[in-house]
Amino acid sequence: MQTAGNAQTGAVETGSTLVGERIAELQDWRYEIDDEKIAWAVFDRAGESVNALGQRPLQELAEIVERVEQAAASGDIVGLIIMSGKKRGFIVGADIREFEQLDSEAKVIEAVSTVNAMLDRVEALKVPVICAIHGNCLGGGLELALACHYRVATRDDTTRIGFPEVKLGIFPGFNGTARSIRQAGGVAAMQAMLTGRMIRASAARAMGLIDELVPSPHRLRWAARRAVLRKRKSKPAGRTKRMMSAWPMRGVVVKKMRAETAKKVSADHYPAPFRLIDLFEKHGNNFKAMQRAETKAFAPLMVSDTSRNLRRVFMLSEEMKAQAPKDLDFKPLRVHVIGAGVMGADIAGWCVASGMQVSLQDLSPEAIEKGIKAQDKLFKRKFRSTAERAAAAARLIADPTGERISRADVVIEAIVEKLEVKQAVFRDVEAKLKPGAVMATNTSSIMIEDIAEGLSDPSRLIGIHFFNPVAQMPLVEVIHGTGSNPTEVQKGCAFVTAISKFPLIVKSVPGFLVNRVLAPYMFEAFQRLEAGEDMNKIDAAAKVFGMPMGPIELADTVGLDVCAHVGEILKGTADGTKLGDMVAKGDLGKKSGRGFYVWKDGKPVRTDTKFDDAELGALGRELVQPLIDEAARCRDEGVVASGDLVDAGVIFGTGFAPFRGGPLHYQASVAAE
Ligand code: NAI
């Protein structure tokens, strides 16, 4: 009997039980024993909107575990339920903000080992331990869940299970490798860890990571309670799944995994997935050995430059989201897009997929029809049920005459790149626009100030500059014209955040940020090409540096006409160059089947020449140098608010090698070497 504990916590003793016992000094957890002798540990991190496993919550959980051990031994409780006290979300993972304190392998090993010992104690508890999950259950959160004896989750669409660690240059370090393999088998668990994908509750149940589903959050407590009383215990992966983790199958599986991973990333740039495969290869079906080896392999990754830089990229993305002020009274629900071409149609589709109602206007009814039809693919990918897809299709409305402009919260213009035509469109829009609505152009090369000329209130116009392809590019530049009203710019950011993109406030300068830094990089490549360098070598070198695609392939993908146009704006004429000649001939790149490359089945046809690694390395660095120099000029001229935001914009707008932490960060680290 814990009389001392009772005096401290004010629990009511009924017979031998501790009904109502609380641990008063907890800040991030609530701990309570109910009248059925079930202990409830509810994670509700103080002062935060989501639960992340930082040092304090983990220490408090350790206190709870100690209390539960004692209460279980004395028969004062019959089980433990771990759940979240937040409305949305279980646990998003370990607290990345605290990772920086772990600056040596020894510190990482110490910190991780303490948590792992605590999770072992959770697993060893003599009473059923049930984890009740609603919303995101990711990374360290999933590792805690896996240390419990049984997992109940809501079938809700917001419930997602996953190991996103590889995206931060690490892999699960709270023994999630060993425990997920035990539950789901080597193949499924490794796939989840190697891809970092977010798994729906039903799929996680099919994999064995979740044991029971309930239809809604209201049923979660009840189902968890029943699981305690019925002493539910999860079953590990069956024989067939286990066989895949044992020799000789493991050898085959590992080989395939290595090949698949190597297709996506290089081991030099992103070592984590490869180290994870090594770990599985060595210890795949030995739980205890894998637990120990996980920590050893995890520590060097955690202190590596790659992981530090990827964590930096994550923090930068958070900083961009914070550009949309939370207290702004602006909730965009209706969007009107003018221009149903390449960009307009996809912008409309993306807004619909984000839950908004969108009207689409174009001079050409065929363009509207084609643009709307083209969104089917996106809706298919985004929505599982036919009802959801039908609802999305119904939210995308053809509006050839712009009748819905007056009801829209945001109007985006994406018509031909011609100043007078845009000016005329905005005069019409301004006359119809309701008060408080945002008025934006998607122009990539015309000055906002010029388009705004002739409006009764030019300060209302801002730029909202999307990148192509809209669905894939995470960044949207929000352009602050010289005369733009800052509130309109903030509303623009709120809109961009509402459609799950990263907003970046950029000054109105030619090329804005992304095209401005890309142009000298592309022109460096074109010049080398003109001087006789092999384009296959140029592209290979850029990839060795860590760019997602080489500059020549990128030019072909964007369209050589678009490149020439951007080039004219930033650098003068493309006439007389190879680029200019090709545009004149109608060789526009991927879209016309021929550009610098010949394109077959959506892929460039390459020579299979092998190039020297050292040469590629040196050439790669030379190719990106003009981009880095331009990025530095953008910082110095205050094109965006800080050097960090230049890095963020260039990473999310161009795909600049994320593991290098951004062009300016890379330059500074090279200088410091
Ligand atoms: P596009 O040529 O594919 O589509 C333009 C559409 O606007 C056509 O369907 C045309 O019928 C329509 N249109 C022309 N005048 C109109 C008017 N007065 N009222 C209504 N509709 C009208 O052009 P795209 O590539 O979609 O570009 C549109 C805008 O987006 C341009 O300002 C461009 O600079 C910008 N942009 C383009 C990117 C790209 O990669 N294509 C990337 C980012 C921005």
Image (spheres, grey):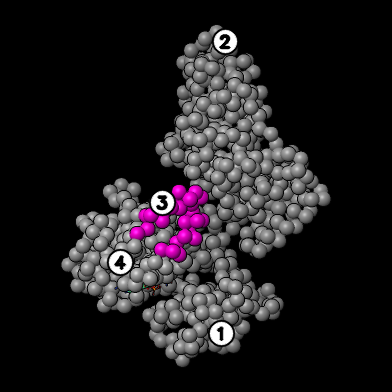
* Above or below, 314 relative to 424: above
Spatial distance from mark 3 to mark 2, Cα to Cα? 57 Å
* Above or below, 647 relative to 326: below
Spatial distance from mark 2 to mark 1, Cα to Cα? 84 Å
Q: Residue furthest left?
A: 456
Q: Which residue is mark 2?
A: 16
Spatial distance from mark 2 to mark 4, Cα to Cα? 75 Å
**Residue 105 appears in view:** no
Image region (quadrant) for ligand 1:
bottom left
**Of 7 and 274, the residue lying toward us:** 274
Q: Residue furthest top?
A: 15
Q: Position of residue 527 (x, y in %)?
A: 52, 85
Q: Which mark is residue 400?
A: 4
Spatial distance from mark 4 to mark 3, Cα to Cα? 21 Å
The residue that appears at 66% across and 59% down in the rendered structure is 261
Q: Which mark is residue 529?
A: 1
The residue that appears at 55% across and 21% down in the rendered structure is 38
Instruction: Name which of mark 4 and mark 3 comes first in the sequence.
Output: 3
Q: Which residue is mark 3?
A: 391
The crowd level at tag 3 (other Cα within 10 Å; few <14, some 14-19, many 20+) is: some
